[in-house]
Amino acid sequence: MQIALANPMHISEVVTFFNKNLDCNNNAVYSEEFLCPLGIKAAIKRKQMIVATVEGQVVGAFRFYRKKTQNTISLYQFAISKEYRGQGLLKRMLKTINDLPIIAFYPTFSEFNDYFHKTDWELQQQSEMFNVWVYSV
């Protein structure tokens, strides 16, 4: 398995990967932007997408951006192929950029908050609309 920054050659495969692995009916996908091909393409061009590949096939991907004013990294979206879930792949991928705390915002009503709780993210803040999760190594 290789984990690295996505490059422009990955664009169509990453778009297909997110469309296959992110279900727009899942309440963790709270923005249509998560499935926008132009946003994915722009993130790859800005070097803000990490991919995990096995034999050239994308099996995991996440989009991030650094918040310079807050010294944090925002995890914007991610997906892991079904056959690689539950194996700690996201954390392995996050270690490639984990020089600052990583922040993830998820709607308070989303069942996906259980994932963050089970995988040792720290609930930093909770509002009426969002939970703010923090991951630090």
Image: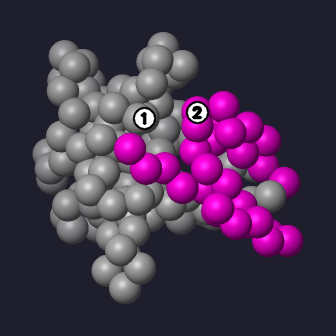
The quadrant the C terminus occupies is top left
Indicate yes or no whether the magenta region holds residue 100: no
Q: Is residue 134 magenta?
A: yes
Disc 1 element: helix
Disc on res. 90: 1
Task: Specify whether residue 97 is in view.
Answer: yes
- The residues bearing labels 1 and 2 have C-alpha atoms spaced at a distance of 10 Å
Q: Amino acid at mark 1?
A: Leu
Q: Amino acid at mark 2?
A: Thr
Q: At 48% across and 38% down in the image, what residue appears?
A: 79
Q: Residue at x 41, y 79 (%)?
A: 70
Front residue of 99 and 107: 99
Q: Residue at x 84, y 54 (%)?
A: 109
Q: Write down the region rendered in magenta.
A: 109-137
Mark whose residue sits in front, 1 or 2:
2
Most foreground residue, 73 or 3:
73
Question: Answer yes or no: do the residues labelled 1 and 2 have beta carbons within 8 Å?
Answer: yes
Give whichever of discs 1 and 2 has the lower sequence position: 1
Q: Residue 129 shows which numbered tag?
A: none
Residue 96, given in percent of the width and then of the height, sits at: 24, 44
Is residue 23 visible in the rendered image? The answer is no
Residue that carries the numbered disc 2 in the rendered image? 119
Q: Is residue 68 left or right of residue 91?
A: left
